[in-house]
Image: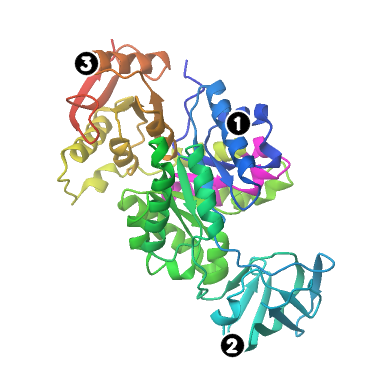
Amino acid sequence: MNDPRIPRHATKIVATLGPASSDPALLEQMILNKVSVVRLNFSHGKAQDHIDRALMVREAARRTGREVAIMADLQGPKIRVGKFAEGKIWLEPGAKFVLDGARTELGDVDAVGLDYKDLPRDVKAGDRLLLNDGLIVLTVDAVKGEAVYTTVRLGGELSNNKGINKQGGGLTAPALTGKDMEDIKTAMSFQADYVAVSFPKNATDMEMARQLCNVAAAEFGHKPGLIAKIERAEAIPKLEEIIRASDGIMVARGDLAVEVGNAAVPALQKKMIRMAREMDRVVITATQMMESMITNPVPTRAEVSDVANAVLDGTDAVMLSAETASGRYPLETVQEMSRICEAAEQAEDKTLDTDFSGHTYNRIDQSIAMGALFTAHHLGAKAIVAMTESGSTPLWMSRHAAHIPVYALTSRLATQRKMALFRNVRPLLMDPESDRDTALEQAEAHLKKRGIVQSGDVYAITCGEPMGAPGGTNMLKICRAT
């Protein structure tokens, strides 16, 4: 019988923790229903809140027998309006409205202060500002001192601290703020497996984040993976360098759509997923994937298609934000998303042979990984077992749609957690063992215990000699289960 702790589908689910999902019993159910990564949103809450939630995640994982990764999502710069005297206002089309960096009193229908004080230096007459995810559109008439004078083009309700975007990009706010630097220290105190960096514009932003993370994590002997959230227009021309400087990217479709336009996002999503996979990086597709399930028990058909298309594009993971953080149906949303992922994967084309056409691999360990995929595919193997210390071999395997599950066995807990984000990789922890033959027997025992293979089934296994050396995968063995 198949082990329920092993996901049925290859695509991973990232769920955001919040008030709606902070009950330990509910979190356990979400993990059992195939949540592989838990996101902690540092835009909300205090340091101790995140520490407590991280401990809850680790405990829930222990009780369910499934390790999950924790992703700390940094807030980034607060490019927002200030607060209003009555909490919100209504802006009529054609009205005049002032965004005033010097204003200290609460806002009204004529003007509001700014959390982002540099806005007057980033805009000029003729620019279009999009507030509240583009629901409010303002045209800049003039900039005088610290005040930006605008005309309302698309009106509506504007409430406290709503975000500001500039159409086409161009806001100079740094990707990492003082708050982010403190939050990195908090995230490293509980060894977050991934850190998501908001609004990076170039590789330098990611390199700075990595340096800060490594310094903060040094005392714990930890190195987190870095995820670049692609949500600025300026990031698109620098996409390749940002991907190279990161361990993965997030297609953050909310702010990105506001800056580049909704119509441009689907093609950009496909491009980003393709580039990340070609460059051996992971990719998360995010924002409003199951938005209607914040209040409704079933998704719309458009949302089902959206999730399925991301899966068919090859994304490693699909992400839930408010759906699980504050929605009414966090568990049901996870269950629906899991079913969509499974159905979409069953419809995928098998393109493994064409994936390898024209490619050369100069590294021994990468060649072994590709050889295992190719051989297992043509032999109809039930599984591929990658014995790994660093996680590199399973990562390379996960870049191709092999339709053969990869079971990554590692003695390192941090590696197991990090691999939770890799598409089609099922990470398992095994006892450290330096003797190769014993380790191979142990690997088969893992598979048989979980119902992955039965006697007579063929599976492939990769490992390194000597055992335990990162980057040392140099052996491929085809086995028949006893």
Cα gap from disc 1 to disc 2, whole angstroms: 50 Å
Gap between marks 1 and 3 measured at Cα: 36 Å
Front of the two marks 1 and 2 = 1
Q: Which tag, 1 or 3, sits closer to the chain's start?
A: 1
**Mark 2 sits on what residue?**
126
On the rendered structure, is 398 left or right of 294? left
Dots 3 and 2: beta carbons under 8 Å?
no
Q: Which residue bears the numbered disc 3?
A: 435
Residue at screen point 54% across, 27% down: 61
Q: Which is more N-terminal, label 2 or label 1?
A: 1
Between 241 and 481, the one nearer to me in the picture: 241
Q: Which residues are magenta?
A: 306-333
Q: Quadrant of residue 240?
A: bottom left
Q: Amino acid at mark 3?
A: Asp
Asked if residue 223 is positioned above or below residue 32 in the image, the reply reads below
Q: Secondary structure at mark 3?
A: loop
Q: Where is residue 350? Give x, y as percent.
A: 34, 42
Q: Secondary structure at mark 1?
A: helix
Q: Are marks 1 and 3 in contact (CB under 8 Å)?
A: no
In the picture of the structure, the residue carrying the numbered disc 1 is 56
